Amino acid sequence: MKHLLITVGLGASGGAESLAGAIAYSVKTHHPDVVHFVVTKESESTTLPLVEQMLEETEVILEKRKIYLTNGEERDFQDVFSKIQDYIKKLKEEDAKAEITVDFTAGTKPMSAGMVLGGCVAGVDSFSYIMNKGEGGKPLRGGEAIIAFGQAFAYQIEEMKKLFAFCFDRYDFSSAAEVLIKMGKIINTSSVQGFVEKWQDIVEFYFRWDLFNHPGEDFKGIPGIPERNKAFLGKLTNPHFPQRDIYFLADILNNAQRRREEKKFDDAVARLYRAVELIAQIKLRAKGIETSNVDTERLPQGLRDKYEPLRNDKGKIQLPLYKNYELLSDLGEELGKNFFNDYELRNLLEKRNNSILAHGFSPVSEEDCLNLKDKILNLAGLLHKSISQIMEEGKFPDYQEVRKNL
């Protein structure tokens, strides 16, 4: 419903009749479903009856309510502000989709100032002011014109959108979601509510993905998601896709990159370490060897005696990272040889083992994180030459890219 809150003064300079004409003009122009007259004891008995008479003459039918300013409240800006703010908040509770305009033409200066600030804080859709076209600035009946100020929260909306974009671009999806919740609560306009509804699904989508909780089929109906991301997830979540393991690797590498951009170097290195392990697992799996339970029958005869003694008390041969690459080297694979020939890579992995998130107490430096990333990307390239292109397919978009797709 459309609501108009409008001050009703005494019209001291131009007379009550002239002011009543301007107020009636505003009501007829805005076409509200409900008009809320902000009145004092004096204006209720002098100006308001004239306004109501003029509206009846033009057969304007609407619901009328009154907001009373008593005991000199019209002369106290703080009193007006508090009353209007509380009134609008209750109105929004009563009508969640209320479209509210505040007209602050008539009344004392404290009334006008209190109306504007109360409307701003409570979050109305627009402000209106009746400007006289006649002489002397008097609100002369028949010479009125409405000046609408558009969305009252235009500046605040833009600032909150900037904050939202800042959080989204830095993968801080929890904070981005909080900004949306705040926008939805304090700015009850159709455009803002539409913005919030669209972006809530998008934020939830990437928040889940960032936690490796990959969205399923339901993501396809979410607007704004780049097609490359949809294609990536479609392959990643398809158990029958032959290169699914490669997409898991690309996803982990992208996740590590996001953590690095956030300056969370220990988190990034933990993911990079998992990527090193996965590279070996993928290569061995292609040969029919599962590192969680190696079947020695799949090994050349000359290697069986070497790996059989590694069975644990459960009868399984479970290979850790270094043993994975040792087996690859034993099988003559370039990946294994490259791993053991790269002293710097193994030194960086050792630093990971000494990090606070592994077995030690030393934080990982940005330089070590970058160096390890480069080493692992080279290793991943030996596994699959198109890994960089696949990673690009699964790269999270920034705010502007999603916005262009909406």
Image (cartoon, grey):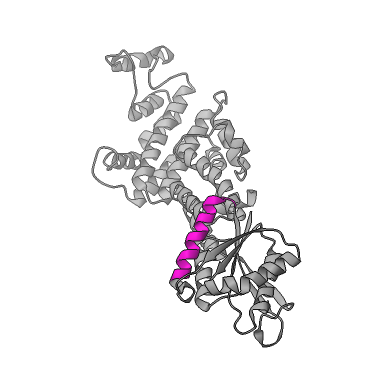
x and y percent of residue 8 in the render?
59, 72
Viewer-side residue, 78 vs 282: 78
Above or below for 264 versus 212: below
Name the residue furthest bottom: 136
Q: Residue at x 53, y 77 (%)?
A: 108
x and y percent of residue 384 in the render?
52, 34
- Left or right of 58 on screen, residue 288: left
Above or below for 295 versus 69: above
Name the residue furthest right: 58
Magenta stretch: dominant SS?
A: helix
Q: Residue at x 46, y 27 (%)?
A: 282
Viewer-side residue, 348 vs 337: 348
Name the residue furthest left: 361
- Left or right of 64 on screen, residue 395: left
Residue numbers of the magenta segment: 79-97
Q: Residue at x 68, y 58 (%)?
A: 62
Q: Is residue 374 visible?
A: no
User: Which corner quadrant of the image does residue 277 belong to?
Assistant: top left
x and y percent of residue 281 in the render?
43, 27
Q: Is residue 214 visible?
A: yes
- Left or right of 140 on screen, residue 278: left
x and y percent of residue 301 in the render?
39, 12
Q: Residue at x 58, y 70 (%)?
A: 44
